Every structure is written in structure tokens, then in C-alpha cells.
Image (tube, helix red, strand yellow):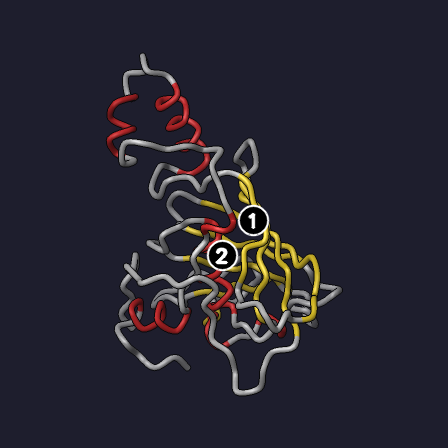
Amino acid sequence: MHVTLCPLLPLRFGTCIFPAVPLKRVWQFKISLKEVTPPVWRVILVPEEYTFWDLHVAIQDAMGWLDCHLHEFQIRHPDLQTLERIGIPQEEPVPLPGGDPTLPGWQIDIADYFSDSNTTAKYLYDFGDGWEHDLVLENVLQRDSQADYPLCLAGERACPPEDCGGPPGYERFLEAIRDETHVDHDGMLKWVGGRFSPEEFDPMEVRFSDPVERWRIAFDDETLI
């Protein structure tokens, strides 16, 4: 299976894939980026019939990541209580201690794992930089017939730039761009595109991608099964 990362996609507000039967409920998740101060977080609503792949795409878009790297959910199996990995299986998976290899997220519904008694998970992105997010199912709500899902309800602060070196690298990056006398000030600003405002975030500006289209680009049009 060939995976092409960092897709350039046309984005549409509130895009999601609906099943033949209209969804009745949406799930409210809070995503919090760990080891970054002040905190970077988002609150999103997603259809209850989403798969983990669909949720991954929504998290990427809400946070502001570019989906250039591998990802993984870590969540307790609701019955076995084992810690399981859900994401993109690799040819040579390395299981967690006492755990199993990565399960394919596009084959697993979030409803198979999340419940009122199993509300938390970890979402890992970019295993090199090591971005870790706390994921919490905060509420289950009736769907608004006038709304399109997913939706970003709230959040604070900009997503760190891709490939900046994880939380320690992001801290060094902020130090450099804030201090005009810093030896790396000009270079860092040029690298990030000339401007970066860590406090800026507007949930109304979030654009959600079609998870099926993201799949087709990432996996070279292979059938989503």
C-alpha cells in the first residue's frame, strides 16, 4: 500500500460524508495539544458514525496541521481494557508493550470504542516531532438539521508550524520570532512564510476536508474499505 502524505486538497466548510440514513446525533470532542504553554485546543462536533480515519481528518483540519506525517490514536478497548493503536498500519508494525500492531482507522467506527464510560484517548501526530494531543468525548448531542458537520465550536491559539521540532522546537521558534535581535529571527520568519501569530485562532475560519477525498489522495485512489 502506497501512502502519499501532505495532500493539497480543495477545502469546503462543514464537509462530511453522510450515510444513506440521516445521522441523528453528533459527538463533541475537545482536542488539547500537550506540552505547549499557553494551551492550544479545539472543540469540534462530528457525526456519530464517523470512523477513526474521519475523526483524524477532522482533527487535522481543526488544529491546522497539514497531514504530512503519520498519526495514531491510542485508546483502551472497551471490553478487554487493552491499550490499542488505531491509525495507518505499517509494513513492519512495532506494537506497544503488551499490545497489538496498529489497526486500520478507516475500518473502525469511533462508536466501537468511545462511550460514556470510555471518553478519553491520545492522538499522536508526526512521530518524529512527537505531537501528542489529549482527546476527550465531552458530550453527545442531537444533530441540528440546519447545520453541516463537522463543525469547530471553539478553540484558542494557532497550531505550531509543521516540522518545527515538537514542543521544545516550537518554544525555541517562538523565542526567535519574538526577539528581533535573536540570531535566528530573520531565518525563522522567512521559514514560516514571513508572519506567525501564536495567539490567533478563529473557529469560523476552519475549513473541513472530505475524508474520502483525503483518503483517495493519500492512498493513490485505492478503494476505501
Name the spot of residue 104 as percent of width and height, x first. 45, 72
- Taking the image as shown, residue 42 lies to the left or right of residue 114, namely left
Residue 138 badge = none
Tell me which residue sits at (54%, 48%) in the image: 133
In the displayed image of the protein, which residue is found farthest to the front?
A: 146
Kindly identify which residue carries mark 1: 42
Q: Nearer the viewer, residue 182 or 22?
A: 22
Q: Is residue 148 above or below residue 18?
A: above
Callout 1–callout 2 Cβ contact below 8 Å: yes
Q: In the image, what residue type sits under mark 1?
A: Arg
Question: Disc 2 residue type?
Answer: Ile
User: Which residue lies at the image location 37% right of the left edge and 46% below the top edge?
Assistant: 128
Q: Look at the numbered disc 1 and give the secondary structure of its residue.
A: strand
Closer to the camera in the image, 137 or 200: 200
Identify the image quadrant of residue 223. bottom left
**Is residue 76 found left or right of 96 in the rendered image?**
right
Which quadrant would the C terminus be assigned to in this image? bottom left
Badge 1, how many Cα within 10 Å: few under 14, some, many 20+? many
Report which residue position mark 2 lands on: 59
Q: Position of residue 125 (x, y in %)?
A: 44, 52
Q: Is residue 178 above or below residue 160?
A: above
Q: Residue at x 37, y 56 (%)?
A: 67
Give 214 or 77, whichever is nearer the viewer: 214
Up-down: is 123 above or below 117? above
For the N terminus, which image quadrant? bottom left
